[in-house]
Image (spheres, helix red, strand yellow):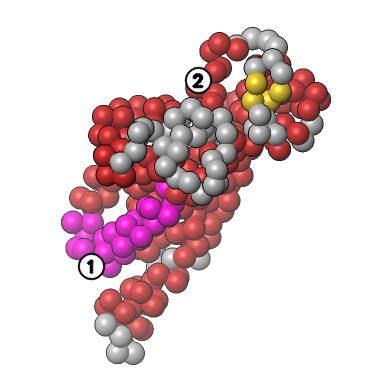
Amino acid sequence: MMWIFAGLNFIFLASAVGLFFFLVLESYPILKLQGFDFWLGQDWWGGESYGALPMLYGSFFVTALACILVLPLALAVALFTSEFLSSSYRRFVKAILELLAGVPGIIYGLLGVSFLSLWIKNIFGLLDGNTLMTAGCLLSIMILPTVLTLSEDAMHAVPAEYRENALGLGLSKWQAAISVVLPQALPGIVGAVLLGIGRAMGETIAVMLVVGSLDRIPDPWFNIFTSAQTIPSKLGREAAEAIGEGTHWSALMALGLTLFLMVFLITLLGNHFLKRVHTS
């Protein structure tokens, strides 16, 4: 069994390394042609110039909005589940969350198109419900199970001695949870958020269905009720028509390389924080 698992790990590692070098080779023509102007440019005209900044903006803005929306609810439910529910109810809640985390992204995307975009359009009186706000709300729903269950694991892993000492000093159970458990679980919570961000940044179909298709930075930049574009949605829309060769294909592969590196670094950092909880 040891050799089997070692072989599987080698296959996974070789696949990741091979994918990285493939993206680097395919991206080389556009990076040689434009250099850093590729990431700093704002114009994307097929056959003329390719600027990735609007897509970078869209990915970061949608992900940040999803984190802002999901954090209060995720931390509140995680704290309640960890500190106030009995073990049987806790296992039930965890099972539901793990089922939700396994729902395919296309299902969330269809629900977003059918309901969420229409609600955003009607509530805020917009001409079109496919906006940054819609994408951020949808992503917050999608990453909620991941952030919630990993945050709850981090809180539950805090040694019981901390709670007992806090209660012995006269703190209530709620005060102990807020003042003792939450600070001790902070590295694990940070790791949970980072892993949630990693999933959010790589989501393609669901975001593509609700974010719109505008390849420019909104004016003003903080306008959340306008269409935009993320790196995954751009790849999903244009990869099929540009596949194979040419500057357009190379530009899309450079976007893929950028996304690969961002998600890799965020996931690596998130796992680092989670390991700190398990080894403490």
Q: Is residue 50 visible?
A: yes
Q: Is-magenta flag for residue 271? A: no
Residue at figure coordinates x 33%, y 78% from the top left? 176
Amino acid under disc 2: Arg
Chain part drawn in magenta: 66-90
Q: Which mark is residue 237?
A: 2
| Image position of 231 with respect to 83: above or below | above
Residue at figure coordinates x 18%, y 56% from the top left? 89
Amino acid under disc 1: Phe
Secondary structure mostly seen in the magenta stretch: helix
Is residue 131 left or right of 191 when viewed as pictured?
A: left
User: Pointer 1: what residue?
Assistant: 84
Nearest to the eye among marks 1 and 2: give it.
Answer: 2
Q: Which mark is residue 248?
A: none
Residue 134 place in picture, x, y as percent: 37, 39
Residue at figure coordinates x 38%, y 71% from the top left? 181
Is residue 177 left or right of 277 when viewed as pictured?
A: left
Residue at figure coordinates x 53%, y 13% from the top left? 240
Q: Is residue 7 visible?
A: no
Secondary element under disc 1, as helix, strand or loop, is: helix
Residue 222 place in picture, x, y as percent: 51, 49
If you read the primary sequence from the N terminus, does the residue marked by circle 1 or circle 2 appear first? 1
